[in-house]
Image (spheres, helix red, strand yellow):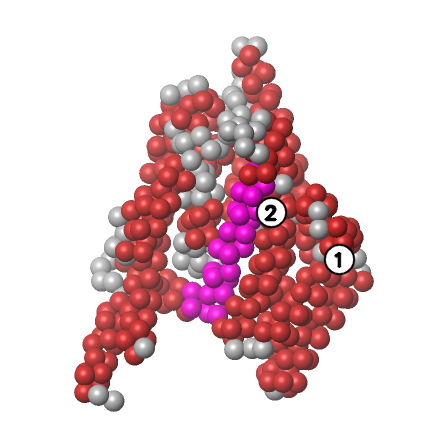
Amino acid sequence: MSPSSAGSKPSSASSSAAALEAPAGEGIVARLERAAAPLAHRIAEAPAVRALQESLPIAFGAALAALVARLAVLLNGRPFPGWSALRALVAFLPSAFALASVLMLVVLSLRLALRLRYPALPLLAAAAVAFALALPHDALTALERFARTRAIDDLAPFARTLGVSGIFTAIVIALGAAGAIALGRRRFGAVAGTAAGACAFVAAAYALFALGLSPASGLASALEPLATLGDSFVALVLITAIESMLWLVGIHGPALLAAIVFPVYLQLQVQNSDAFAHHQPIPHVVVVSTFLFVFPGGAGATLPLVVLLLRSRVRRLRAFGFATLAPALFNINEPVIFGLPIAYNPVLAVPFVLAPVVLSCTTFTAFALGWVGRPLFYTPSTIPALINAFIATLDWRACVLVALNLAIAGAVWLPFVRVYERAETARAARAQPAAGAA
């Protein structure tokens, strides 16, 4: 070892220690950092979490690319394809997520094998077979038809049957296969244990298949009772929390819940519009447009998060904030969820669920007490915040409520963003010695 390299080592170690040093002070942010940062570091660096964070952007990118390709076909050289073509694009959404599910299974299995230093082929094979067995029987039939014809329209029945929970199914299967192999290697050694773990996992998947049990369809069935809660505070809080938690595990929350609860709350929205047209009292608080106030910036109320990132002390986070500001203004936050990422992020997951739940409380209170006019009309979520609130209610006080909600959500996000900044700084400090050695 040269003297210069030997002399640089304490400097690197000291910079890393400085990055990990607990903040002084008795403020809320400092206390939270001291309590949560060590655990967050350990969880964030776990091989499974790192593999998930690396795989989700790839799967989401595949879904986005499929939607863009489908849109290009629908446009066919026209500047605007018409409403029928746009409805066809929305109908293609499950197909895009079905493709993303398959890619997620492959990429996550490979990333887990790399990070855990397991043979990639047994892990991928076990996950692929188990994933096929975990699908509903009708999905397998549709997939066989698509494999024969290779026609994109034949993929639609498979996608509808699989549902947008396919990414979650792929994640569970890949993690389960890796866990089974880990147990096998611990019990029987590297070679025999890998084979034993993979075979045992496939056998368990076949047993569920033989019993007619499908994890993909089971998730949708578990959510069906949400549609019976109606216009209530409990319904608003539960739907908000469940949608947010679904996003955290890689499931498109609104798309999954749409088939279950959207028809119910759209009907309530229509009743509000009809009451307004006939100069009658507006009957319902929880309708489709109510969620515009709960999710400013998209799921997780992430518009304040993006604004906080613009002032971040970490260069990567600051650049990311500027890159995602424009989509966030139009309530498009998939780049934030999968690009930052928030999904499977132990630090940012808490405010992602907590902030919209708090906003559901303020929103329901304001509407129920008559402080703000109740939502009258269905308004697309892609219309920017403040504007969409006024269009939905025709009440200027709705803009005040959205501004208040943004401030509250920002206060919820702030301490967790500070913890995440310290985690990113510590990670960069640990990476510097490795870069210098290379």
Q: Main secondary structure of the magenta part?
A: helix
Q: Which mark is residue 311?
A: none
Q: x%, y% of residue 158?
A: 71, 49
Q: Quadrant of the C terminus?
A: bottom left
Residue at mark 1 to residue at mark 2: CA–CA distance: 24 Å
The answer to whether one can see residue 311 in this image is yes
Q: Position of residue 412 (x, y in %)?
A: 36, 46
Residue 259 versus residue 275 in the image, above or below: below
The region drawn magenta spans 44-71
Quarter holding the N terminus?
A: bottom left
Q: Earlier in the sequence, mark 1 or mark 2?
A: 2
Label 1 sits on what residue type? Leu
Q: Nearer the viewer, residue 389 or 79?
A: 79
The foreground one among 300 and 194 is: 194
In the shown orientation, is residue 319 left or right of residue 101? Answer: left
- Within 10 angstroms of label 2, few (less than 14), some, or many (20 or more) residues? many
Q: Amino acid at mark 2?
A: Ala
Picture disc at residue 96:
2
Q: Residue at x 32, y 45 (%)?
A: 322
Q: Residue under circle 1?
A: 213
Residues packed near mark 1 inside 10 Å, few (<14), some (14 to 19) or many (20 plus): some
At x 66%, y 85%, the residue is 192
Residue 168 in the image, given as x and y percentages of width and height:
60, 55
Measured as percent of width and height from the top left, residue 146 is found at: 73, 51
Q: Is residue 143 left or right of residue 253?
A: right
